[in-house]
């Protein structure tokens, strides 16, 4: 087990290396020039070349890559071309809102989706099942920004129950303001994940309910509720946990639209701004960070399997 | 004295699209305290539906009891509210199932699964429960109860798992135990021990047992009374002596006659040319770890055999004996670790997959489970012609051959346009045989090919295999755990245990004078020898 964990952690190194190379090359291949953005609309061609020289962007790609890699190995993700702040600082500043939004979304989604999916599976083919599946298809289909503005319109503007936009840190500004601000973004993001997780739960539980040991549990005189929770859900957990894990990874890297709609200063917004400005160091740093998160969460999921299913051993 | 179980005129309806109106019709039977009643029948006879109705475990969407009564110690189960029924399940009536692997929850320790029974029906404290669990494990003669209670099902053997199921079912000393084919999935020696255990517990506790089986050998071994079912109806019932020795219904006689005899018939010695031989065949699974931490299983060790055309060589052994590994090595479905495999004089043991492909048609296999070995989305005909066409036989010719073969295996030509799900298990196995024959093989491997079939069908498929062996002068390798079946079809026999060859020789000689203790144990374990007419 420990050997497996050590192996998995070590094996992230080559993966990260490949990611670093790809991110670097793809960014340089994409059209757009940070120097031109910095120089502004009225700059001359000479200005742009001078800025490019200063940024080191006119060196051969290989040299640029090695320079970046060298810094990287010392834990330095570089400095933003525009704000002149270290990328690590920018990421850490923006991490809190994104992490907390991810956390609330996942807790909310799991709390709603797992019971929904389980009930749908237990009553497969019934009215409740169809309703859950209808909601699930709807949840997948509705774009985040449409849902977001609809919720803002209803809860913030029409009924004036919740704030329209913004973010309050629970650490410096209090838990209550934080919760009031996080409810709508959580609900908006949650819909997709509820759809995803409830579908997976339904499929997985349905399969397990056909198993012989469910019949054994009934033969023991166990109640249906306990059969569902104690026997079915535990056995159905592996695929459900997988989806939840992927959900967490997606949320940390992919809340660009929601953060924009609700004006939350998180990583998603940082990505968006950096891409628009061609702020190479930030984009590179973020991509590396996201892929690290992805790999790390996958490792956690794999380790979770051993707790959920004693037959899985590494 | 009231009967433990009294079923009167029980009728259970099938859904409207079923192949008949009722799953079981007008079934009446009773189980007295201290009595073992066997319900015998083939698949579709309604024996399991009867058992599940008693337990209230029918799928309510598909099957509903429409008439009759089921009384457990006088209480009519069909009219009870769910809550009362749940209280009775486990407490007054319990059930054990065919597959001890799948009947236990794989992610819960077995001790906890037994404790769950006590948790549902009693108010014992966790310590008291633990003590009862350990006592229950000791009652079913499991060694080291302390350690076993903390194991997960996959860490136990099939026999141990079935003992766990029995311990669980009997934890609360129910009045009625329903056993649904509890030994069918087990090895013969294990089967004998489990049957003995059920019998012992039954007589020491005086409970009634409703024992569902398809195997008259098992009936002869364990039953006090027998109920024979066919197509959802009871066709005969009586004491075991009456039913076994003076069956009144022709179907009962057919079932008894279908149990293969343990006495091998006279067989002429095969003189065909040598088709297959192996020398020193070894197969190891797993790898020795770099620092000696790996786990290696020697699945087959130093197996040498020869097989002539027109001859049937049986490999018998219990699960884990390595008999299937040998077959898979010969097919090169797994790569042997060392040794020679000569097919018509060519060594294929180390041959590359590319060159092996040209020899593949010479050696064909029929698998155990006919329900899973045919592609469900392909017509039978397409499944049969696929192989020959892969080897360059023209389409017309392949179809002509398919039509010919499907009649040889005893099916009509229109079979070819239909899909596998439209056929019964026996018919599917015939299709699988036709598919194997379409390749014009020299060697046919039958890997437990009749083990999943009903006895009456089993006899027919065995006869078919013997016919095609003769007709096409096939060299047949017959893998089985069933000594009765092996006695009937094999010219020579090899007994395997723990990957090693224990004994071999002409079937009649081995059965009459086994030279090894293991062979003797194996032969003695075949059920029903004392009471079945031979």
Image (cartoon, coloured by chain):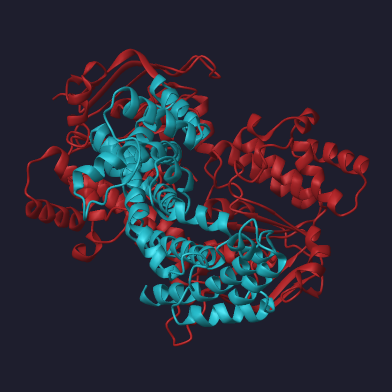
Vertical order, B394 against B230 (above or below): below
State the residue in front, B179 or B495.
B179
Say whether residue A129 is left or right of residue B277. Answer: left
**Which chain corresponds to the colour cyan?**
A
Q: Position of residue A50 (x, y in %)?
A: 65, 73
Instruction: Name which residue lies at 16% across and 23% down.
Output: B2
Give the mark count: 0
Whether residue A111 can be seen here: no
B518 on left or right of B408: left
Choose top left, top right, bottom left or bottom right for residue B31: top left
Q: Residue furthest top?
A: B67
Q: Quadrant of residue B339?
A: bottom right
In the image, taking residue B308 as reference, residue B144 lies left or right, namely left
Above or below, B52 relative to A170: above
Q: Colour of chain B?
A: red
B356 relative to A100, above or below: below
Identified at 40% across, 73% down, the residue is A5
Q: Residue at x 55, y 77 (%)?
A: A68
In the rendered image, the residue lying farthest to the bottom is B291
Q: Is residue A115 among the parts visible in the rendering? A: yes
Quadrant where the N terminus of chain B lies?
Answer: top left
Q: Residue B27 at what x, y percent from top left?
A: 37, 19
Question: Could you say which is closer to the camera, residue A233 or residue B130?
Answer: A233
Q: Horizontal and vertical percent for residue B334?
A: 64, 67
Say above or below: A73 vs B244: below
On the image, the x and y values in percent for residue B430 come to 69, 40
Quarter where residue A25 is shown: bottom right
């Amino acid at each position: 087990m420990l050997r497996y964990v050590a192996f998995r952690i070590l094996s992230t190194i080559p993966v990260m290396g490949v990611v670093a190379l790809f991110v670097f090359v793809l960014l340089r291949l994409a059209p757009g020039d940070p120097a031109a953005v910095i120089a502004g609309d009225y700059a001359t061609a000479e200005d742009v070349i001078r800025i490019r020289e200063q940024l080191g962007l006119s060196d051969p790609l290989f040299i640029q890559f090695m320079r970046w890699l060298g810094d990287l190995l010392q834990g330095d993700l570089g400095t933003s071309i525009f704000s002149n702040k270290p990328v690590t600082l920018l990421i850490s500043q923006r991490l809190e809102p994104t992490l907390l939004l991810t956390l609330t979304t996942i807790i909310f989604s799991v709390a709603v989706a797992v019971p929904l999916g389980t009930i749908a599976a237990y009553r497969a083919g019934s009215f409740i099942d169809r309703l859950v599946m209808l909601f699930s298809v709807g949840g997948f289909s509705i774009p985040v920004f449409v849902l977001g503005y609809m919720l803002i319109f209803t809860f913030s503007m029409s009924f004036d129950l919740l704030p329209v936009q913004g973010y309050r840190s629970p650490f410096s500004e209090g838990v209550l303001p934080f919760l009031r601000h996080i409810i709508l973004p959580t609900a908006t993001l949650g819909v997709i994940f509820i759809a995803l997780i409830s579908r997976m739960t339904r499929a997985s539980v349905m399969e397990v309910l056909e198993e012989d040991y469910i019949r054994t549990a009934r033969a023991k005189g166990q109640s249906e509720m306990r059969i569902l929770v104690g026997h079915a859900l535990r056995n159905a957990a592996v695929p459900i946990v997988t989806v939840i894990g992927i959900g967490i990874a997606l949320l940390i890297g992919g809340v660009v639209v929601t953060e924009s709609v609700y004006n939350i200063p998180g990583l998603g917004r940082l990505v968006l701004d950096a891409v628009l400005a061609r702020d190479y160091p930030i984009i590179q740093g973020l991509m590396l960070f996201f892929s690290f998160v992805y790999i790390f969460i996958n490792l956690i999921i794999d380790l979770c399997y051993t707790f959920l299913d004693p037959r899985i051993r590494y | 004295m009231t009967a433990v179980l009294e079923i009167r005129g029980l009728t259970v309806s099938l859904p409207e699209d079923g192949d008949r109106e009722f799953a079981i019709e007008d079934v009446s039977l009773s189980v007295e305290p201290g009595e073992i009643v066997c319900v015998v029948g083939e698949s579709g006879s309604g024996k399991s539906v009867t058992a599940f109705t008693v337990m209230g475990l029918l799928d309510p969407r598909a099957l509903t009891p429409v008439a009759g009564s089921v009384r457990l110690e006088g209480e009519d189960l069909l009219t009870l509210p769910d809550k009362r029924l749940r209280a009775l399940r486990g407490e007054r009536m319990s059930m054990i199932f065919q597959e001890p692997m799948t009947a236990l929850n794989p992610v819960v320790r077995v001790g906890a699964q037994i404790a769950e029974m006590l948790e549902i029906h009693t108010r014992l404290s966790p310590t008291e429960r633990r003590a009862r669990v350990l006592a229950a494990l000791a009652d079913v003669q499991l060694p080291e109860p302390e350690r076993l209670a903390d194991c997960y099902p996959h860490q136990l053997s099939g026999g141990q798992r079935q003992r766990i199921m029995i311990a669980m079912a009997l934890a609360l000393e129910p009045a009625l135990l329903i056993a649904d084919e509890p030994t069918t999935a087990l090895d013969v020696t294990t089967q004998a021990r489990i049957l003995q255990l059920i019998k012992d517990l039954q007589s020491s506790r005086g409970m009634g047992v409703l024992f569902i089986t398809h195997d008259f050998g098992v009936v002869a071994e364990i039953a006090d009374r027998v109920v024979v079912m066919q197509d959802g109806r009871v066709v005969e019932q009586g004491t075991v002596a009456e039913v076994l020795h003076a069956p009144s219904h022709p179907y009962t006689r057919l079932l008894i006659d279908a149990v293969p005899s343990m006495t091998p018939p006279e067989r002429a010695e095969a003189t065909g040319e040598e088709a297959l031989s192996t020398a020193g065949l070894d197969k190891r699974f797993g790898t020795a770890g770099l620092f000696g931490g790996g786990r290696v299983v020697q699945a087959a060790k130093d197996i040498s055999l020869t097989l002539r055309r027109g001859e049937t060589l049986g490999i018998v052994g219990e699960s884990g004996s390595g008999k299937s590994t040998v077959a898979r090595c010969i097919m090169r479905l797994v790569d042997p670790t060392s040794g020679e495999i000569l097919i018509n004089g060519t060594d294929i043991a180390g041959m590359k997959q590319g060159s092996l492909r040209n020899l593949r048609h010479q050696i064909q296999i029929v698998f155990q489970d006919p329900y899973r070995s045919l592609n469900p989305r392909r017509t039978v005909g397409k499944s049969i012609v696929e192989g020959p066409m892969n080897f360059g036989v023209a389409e017309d010719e392949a179809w002509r051959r398919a039509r010919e073969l499907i009649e040889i295996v005893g099916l009509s030509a229109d079979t070819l346009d239909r899909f596998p799900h439209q056929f019964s298990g026996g018919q599917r196995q015939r299709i699988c045989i036709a598919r194997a024959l379409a390749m014009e093989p020299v060697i046919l491997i039958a890997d437990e090919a009749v083990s999943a079939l009903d006895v009456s069908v089993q006899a027919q498929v065995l006869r078919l295999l013997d016919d095609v062996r003769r007709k096409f002068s096939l060299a047949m390798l017959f893998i089985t755990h069933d000594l009765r079946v092996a006695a009937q079809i094999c010219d020579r026999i090899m007994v395997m245990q723990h990957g090693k060859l224990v004994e071999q020789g002409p079937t009649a000689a081995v059965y009459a004078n086994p030279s090894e203790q293991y062979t003797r144990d194996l032969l003695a374990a075949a059920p029903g020898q004392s009471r079945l007419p031979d």
